[in-house]
Image (cartoon, rainbow, N blue to C red):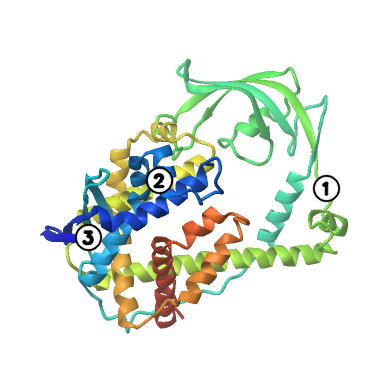
Amino acid sequence: MKYDIKNLPQSLIEITVELPFEEIQPQLIKAAQKLSTDAKIEGFRPGKAPYDIVKNKFGEMAILQEATDNIIAGSFFRIIKEKNLTTIGQPKIDLEKIAPNNPFCFKATVALLPQVKVGDYSGLQLKRRPIEIKPETTDQVIMEIRKMRSNEKIVERAAQAGDRVEIDFDIYLDKVPIENGQHKKYPLVLGEEKFIPGFEERISGLKAGDSKEFDLKFPEKYFEPKLAGKLADFKVSCLAVSEISLPTADDEFAQQVSGGNIATLSDLRANIAKNLELEEINKQEQRLEIEMLEKLVGLSEFDPLPDLLVREEIHRMLHELEDSVSRQGFNFPDYLQAIKKNEADLEKELRPQAEMRVKTAILSREIYGRQNLEVRPDEIAAEIELILKNYPENPDMRRQLESETYKDYLKNVLGNRKVIEYLKGQIIK
């Protein structure tokens, strides 16, 4: 293997690598075995077809492409280890030459770990506050459970507090319908105050088939600026009134909601309070960890950050946001349209937070080395087994998790955990 390392601005280096074709043969053989495992070749057990048979079926270029990631990873990390380089983030890979019976050439651009002068945090102290779950908070949770188990019955009477009404309504400003101000079969529970103040009071007393017109002022701090503080006209038609019956909060209720695991309402309240307490403890720990790391970053001095690292972190944050939006059932382009922003706007907004994340990672790595912290192979293995519990009988997943690349990733994750626990022991009381 031949390689050349070139220094670039902002702590970047460019590594140009050339591997003789003979040197990558072991990876080609592994790739051929993988291809013959994934695609059945008649007359051979999965993964057992000879190399020449696989080559004749798929072509040598297909084998080479299958092997590309492993060839690059193996040679790249070998160079990093030989030169004792401390890199951070994923390398940007450009294939220079990939062809059968020719040298394999690629270029890797990667950021070196910028230097950091860790600030003196010996006087930094953060305190945990006592967690108290008030009885009314537990009451609210029990009420929500009761609502989820409620029954509804259509009634032919006037709507009153606690009823669910279904309405059509239109909103007008200066007798002109507002944008998105027309609603059909809109459900509303009177008394929950989930609409603008005064609206529920205006429609209380309506029966199915009744209509009503009234004016109502939007709150001064309404989320839609065009409506904030404006007096609007409302036209409402009541379609249906339903009486909501809530189950009684008693011992029988406690047994039903817990599947028989909790005997009394008192025990249910205690169980809810304990879960709420654990939730608040976790929130407090997360808040203190963030505050601790931000203060440490503020105390420390950093070399200029490679823009590649910051942009990579921004893109990671964008993907996290997109995943979050998708899990809530929304389309990301529609979400951007709703908040009146594009990806460039979001990238600009996310940059300060991305820079903080990058600095935190650099600081964590420096403290990890200073304190001689260590992630043992058995800890990595235990973490892999923990993940694999979610993927029983999945050999492909096991191979992926046990790859050196993923083990390096896990080592960083577990190392960061150890740094945070060490720092918490020093700073948070």
Dividing the picture into quadrants, the one containing residue 61 is top left
Query: Is residue 37 among the parts visible in the rendering?
Result: yes
- Pair 3/2: label in front: 2
Q: Which residue is mark 3?
A: 111
Q: Position of residue 113 (x, y in %)?
A: 23, 66
Asked if the residue under mark 2 is in contact with the one under mark 1, i.e. CB atoms within 8 Å, the reply is no
Q: Position of residue 411 (x, y in %)?
A: 41, 69
Q: Earlier in the sequence, mark 3 or mark 2?
A: 2
- Say which amino acid is labelled 1: Pro
* Mark pair 3, 2: CA separation: 40 Å
Q: SS at mark 2?
A: helix
**Disc 2 marks which residue?**
52
Q: Residue at x 78, y 27 (%)?
A: 158
Lateral position of residue 137 relative to residue 103, left or right: right
Name the residue carrying label 1. Answer: 247
Which residue is painted at 22% across and 69% down in the image?
85
Which quadrant holds residue 88? bottom left
